[in-house]
Image: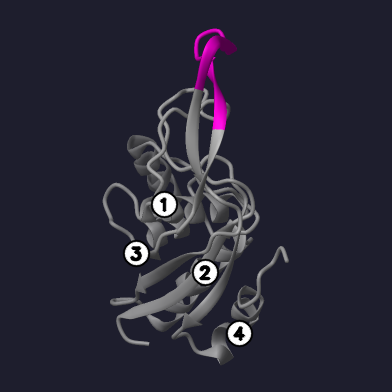
Amino acid sequence: MVGLVRIEVELKPLSSLTVGGSSPSSSADIPFNRLLVPPSTIKGSMRTAVTALLPDCYTACGEVEPRLIRLRHGKMGGPCDVCKLFGYPDSPGRVYVTVESQPGEFHLLSRVSIDDERWVAEEKKLFSQQVIKPGETIVVSVAMDTRGLGQDEEERLVRLLLYSLHALRLWRLGRGAMVDLRVRSHDLPEDKYGDLLEPLKRWLWE
């Protein structure tokens, strides 16, 4: 592997998927939906999932606010493994996500508008919302920049990337949708990463 590792993934929601929304009570009332799945959403969910389900041999600062990330890294003696891979305020990280194909179909749901201050339904305020249908496939390309890494550090971070894909299948995407995924193609050596790759070649939730 020289410079860049690529993994192509098929991803599908197991429940209606919505990305976007500006309401504080967004779990119940989502007034805005862009209908597309931004790469940043997938990358952020991979990061959150692997942080929550972190293997014992890796580190995560667990912070999201830049000042707290820097403080935490200072106490740790350097960036945590998750930040090395996915980025932090002083570094763009090594993972790049591209959505190669967006889902082709959506369906319409009717929602009740929620008063964000009182957390109650507002009378006579219904709105319609388009959501990505369960089972609609999204093709995603995940790339990792390996330049400048020693052999041991490269293997360590590639494995963390694969762990993040495993973790995403046990986490949520967008506004709370559970997703499944499988690896469609990759350029990783099977003898080194086969233990993590083989389970990723099959849907988990079928």
Task: Look at the image and give the residue range highlighted in magenta.
Answer: 110-126
Residue 79 visible somewhere in the drawing: yes
Q: Secondary structure at mark 1?
A: loop
Question: Is the C-beta separation of discs 4 and 3 under 8 Å?
Answer: no
C-alpha gap between disc 2 and disc 3: 16 Å
Residue located at (54% from left, 70% from top): 162
Circle 1 residue: 37
Q: Position of residue 104 (x, y in %)?
A: 45, 59
Q: Position of residue 127 (x, y in %)?
A: 49, 25
Q: Amino acid at mark 2?
A: Glu
Q: Is residue 126 above or below residue 107?
A: above
Q: Nearer the viewer, mark 2 or mark 3?
A: 2
C-alpha gap between disc 4 and disc 2: 18 Å
What secondary structure is the magenta-colored segment mainly?
A: strand
C-alpha gap between disc 1 and disc 3: 15 Å
Circle 4 residue: 194
Q: Which residue reaches farthest right?
A: 206
